[in-house]
Image (spheres, rainbow, N blue to C red):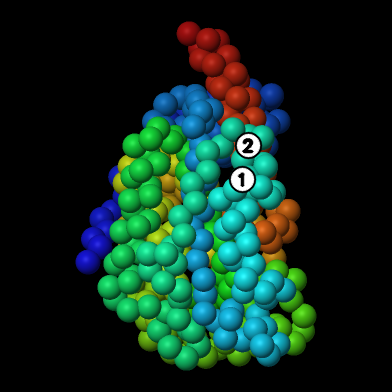
Amino acid sequence: MAVFTPAPPVDAEAADAVRVGLGATPRGVSFGRLCEPAAWLAGAQGQVPARSPMNARLVVFAGHNSIAGAHYQGAGLSAFAPAATDEQVEELRTGVGPVSALARRLGVGVSLINVTDTCGPAGGIDTSDAMDAATVDAAFELGAKAANSAVDAGADLLIPAELGVGATTVAAAVMGVITRTEPVQIVGPGSGITDAMWKTKVRVVRDAMFRARNFASDPRELIQLIGSPNLAALTAFIAQAAQRRTPVLIDGPLVATAALLAERLSIDCRHWCYATGIGPEPAHRLALQELGLVPLLNLDIRAGGGLGALNALPLLISAVDLAAGEVAAVSRNLS
């Protein structure tokens, strides 16, 4: 069974030094909210000023959710057919599509992990468990190993992401239980669904939430009942990244949900996470609120695969570079 331990602390003094340095000059103050990503990264790196990431890596966890196929013949849950998961996986594998193109443009390495190959698809969470206990452990191990592999290969910034039709349904069900939010309030527009699809999705989330209603404070059981192998792998990935003292960018509702579960399993790992954006899904917003994370951007991006985090990365780098110059100038004046 996977064992989670509290995350090591970030360097709060380094983060505060960046905030103080930027707050000491009119120009530093004028940078506004760009102060925060620079301060966060300084705390994660334990140095002032922070250095720009040189080896960011996107790690995409792909997986099938049985609920997508089970309800596809009716109103469906998504604007995408279940086969879209395999199509998107093939895009990433062959280096085509928007995520691959943007990652190349930014010099970000990409790793693709097909969780279904190791753990199988998630069960139909409205009528059965997502997986058994052994599969939870296998998914946890897969995620932790992926984090270790990336860090061992030199990654200094990690971007976990998901691919899989039905991911927002899983996120809505899990966050609905954790926050005790009604299904009609937790289910969002997903991939751009019709009213009929939304009603089907609400019913699925309602039934899943009822099955897991007594496990709001038990992350592992919640994942097993109404999560997915993808969610389990992402949770362990984020927790292990924190153990390896490597900063993580959080993007999308399922990844944000995984970050919250990781925080519940590995206390204080949230300090190693930075929210790059917020989309239209209530589950995404609630997860970030529970984590105490303020998103950098609000672009209403619904796409998975880390597209939101990749778009935010240049802004993060700009913030670090701006802060570095200003903090260095303040230090020279003080000396």
Q: Is residue 24 above or below residue 300?
A: above
Residue found farthest to the right? 194
Using the rendered image of the protein, determine whether residue 270 is visible from the camera's viewpoint.
yes
Say which residue appears at 58% left-offset and 81% top-offset.
69
Q: For mark 1, what is the residue?
A: 95
- Residue 204: image quadrant is bottom right
Residue 218: x, y in percent?
34, 75
Marks 1/2: CA distance? 9 Å
Closer to the camera in the image, 198 or 78? 78
Disc ID at residue 3: none
Q: Earlier in the sequence, mark 1 or mark 2?
A: 1
* Circle 2: residue type: Arg
Whether 207 is drawn above or below 136: the answer is below
Give the residue displayed 72% in from the left and 74% down from the top: 79
Q: Position of residue 222 (x, y in %)?
A: 39, 77
Q: Is residue 181 left or right of residue 79?
A: left
* Pointers 1 and 2 in contact (C-beta within 8 Å): yes
Using the rendered view, name the quadrant where residue 119 is placed: bottom left
295 to 186, vertically: above or below:
above
**How far across and down, in percent of the image, does residue 291 sit?**
48, 59
Q: Is residue 13 above or below residue 325?
A: below
The residue labelled by disc 2 is 104
Instruction: Give the amino acid type for the residue marked by disc 1 in the picture.
Output: Gly
